[in-house]
Amino acid sequence: VGASALIDEIKSVSPDLPVLLVGGHVSALPSETLDKTQADYVCQGEGILTSYELWQALQGECELEAVHGLVRRSNGG
Protein backbone atom coordinates (compact mmCIF):
# COMPACT_ATOMS: atom_id res chain seq x y z
CA VAL A 1 0.00 0.00 0.00
CA GLY A 2 2.81 2.43 0.88
CA ALA A 3 4.71 1.75 -2.32
CA SER A 4 1.58 2.34 -4.38
CA ALA A 5 0.94 5.68 -2.66
CA LEU A 6 4.55 6.70 -3.27
CA ILE A 7 4.29 5.79 -6.96
CA ASP A 8 1.06 7.82 -7.22
CA GLU A 9 2.89 10.84 -5.77
CA ILE A 10 5.89 10.38 -8.08
CA LYS A 11 3.64 10.08 -11.14
CA SER A 12 1.68 13.20 -10.14
CA VAL A 13 4.93 15.20 -10.21
CA SER A 14 6.73 13.40 -13.08
CA PRO A 15 4.27 11.28 -15.07
CA ASP A 16 6.91 10.21 -17.61
CA LEU A 17 9.46 9.04 -15.02
CA PRO A 18 9.77 5.25 -15.37
CA VAL A 19 9.13 3.31 -12.16
CA LEU A 20 10.45 -0.22 -11.54
CA LEU A 21 9.27 -2.29 -8.57
CA VAL A 22 11.38 -5.15 -7.22
CA GLY A 23 10.97 -7.56 -4.33
CA GLY A 24 9.42 -10.85 -3.36
CA HIS A 25 5.78 -9.74 -3.48
CA VAL A 26 5.96 -8.10 -6.89
CA SER A 27 8.07 -10.96 -8.25
CA ALA A 28 5.38 -13.44 -7.22
CA LEU A 29 2.49 -11.31 -8.52
CA PRO A 30 3.86 -9.19 -11.39
CA SER A 31 0.66 -8.78 -13.43
CA GLU A 32 -1.43 -8.02 -10.36
CA THR A 33 1.14 -5.45 -9.26
CA LEU A 34 0.99 -3.69 -12.62
CA ASP A 35 -2.81 -3.77 -12.53
CA LYS A 36 -2.99 -2.23 -9.04
CA THR A 37 -0.23 0.39 -9.29
CA GLN A 38 1.06 3.00 -11.70
CA ALA A 39 4.43 1.23 -11.89
CA ASP A 40 5.75 0.92 -15.41
CA TYR A 41 7.86 -2.17 -14.81
CA VAL A 42 8.05 -5.07 -12.37
CA CYS A 43 11.02 -7.30 -11.81
CA GLN A 44 10.29 -11.01 -11.73
CA GLY A 45 13.39 -12.65 -10.30
CA GLU A 46 16.82 -11.11 -9.75
CA GLY A 47 16.32 -7.37 -9.28
CA ILE A 48 19.92 -6.29 -9.69
CA LEU A 49 20.28 -7.85 -13.13
CA THR A 50 16.88 -6.66 -14.30
CA SER A 51 17.37 -3.08 -13.12
CA TYR A 52 20.78 -2.85 -14.81
CA GLU A 53 19.48 -4.27 -18.08
CA LEU A 54 16.42 -1.99 -17.92
CA TRP A 55 18.72 1.01 -17.51
CA GLN A 56 20.65 -0.15 -20.59
CA ALA A 57 17.39 -0.51 -22.56
CA LEU A 58 16.19 2.95 -21.53
CA GLN A 59 19.54 4.31 -22.75
CA GLY A 60 18.95 2.64 -26.13
CA GLU A 61 21.69 0.05 -25.67
CA CYS A 62 19.31 -2.92 -26.05
CA GLU A 63 15.65 -3.70 -26.58
CA LEU A 64 13.18 -3.93 -23.69
CA GLU A 65 12.29 -7.44 -24.86
CA ALA A 66 15.89 -8.50 -24.09
CA VAL A 67 15.71 -7.51 -20.40
CA HIS A 68 15.70 -10.66 -18.24
CA GLY A 69 12.85 -10.87 -15.73
CA LEU A 70 11.13 -7.66 -16.84
CA VAL A 71 7.33 -7.54 -16.77
CA ARG A 72 5.82 -4.42 -18.33
CA ARG A 73 2.73 -2.98 -19.84
CA SER A 74 2.52 -3.33 -23.58
CA ASN A 75 -0.01 -1.68 -25.87
CA GLY A 76 -1.98 -0.35 -22.92
CA GLY A 77 -2.23 -3.70 -21.13
Image (cartoon, grey):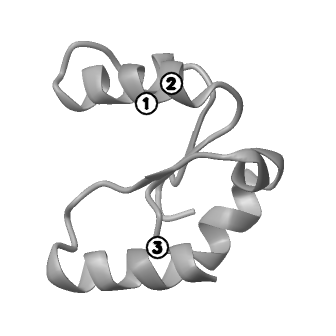
Q: Which one is closest to the eye, mark 2 or mark 3? A: 2
Residue extending furthest toward the front: 2
Q: Residue at x 66, y 46 (%)?
A: 23
Q: Cα distance, mark 1 to mark 2?
A: 5 Å
Residue 28: x and y in percent read 83, 48
Q: Which one is closest to the eye, mark 3 or mark 1? A: 1
Query: In the picture, which quadrant includes the C terminus?
Result: bottom right
Q: Return the residue at label 3.
A: 38
What kind of element bears circle 2?
helix
Q: Return the residue at label 1.
A: 51
Q: Residues within 10 Å of mark 3 (few under 14, many from 20)?
A: many
What kind of element bears circle 1?
helix
Q: Residue at x 22, y 73 (%)?
A: 15
Q: Return the residue at label 2.
A: 48
Residue 1: x and y in percent read 64, 83
Q: Cα distance, mark 2 to mark 3?
A: 21 Å
Q: Nearer the viewer, residue 25 or 40?
A: 25
The amino acid type of the residue labelled 3 equals Gln
Q: Cα distance, mark 3 to mark 1?
A: 17 Å
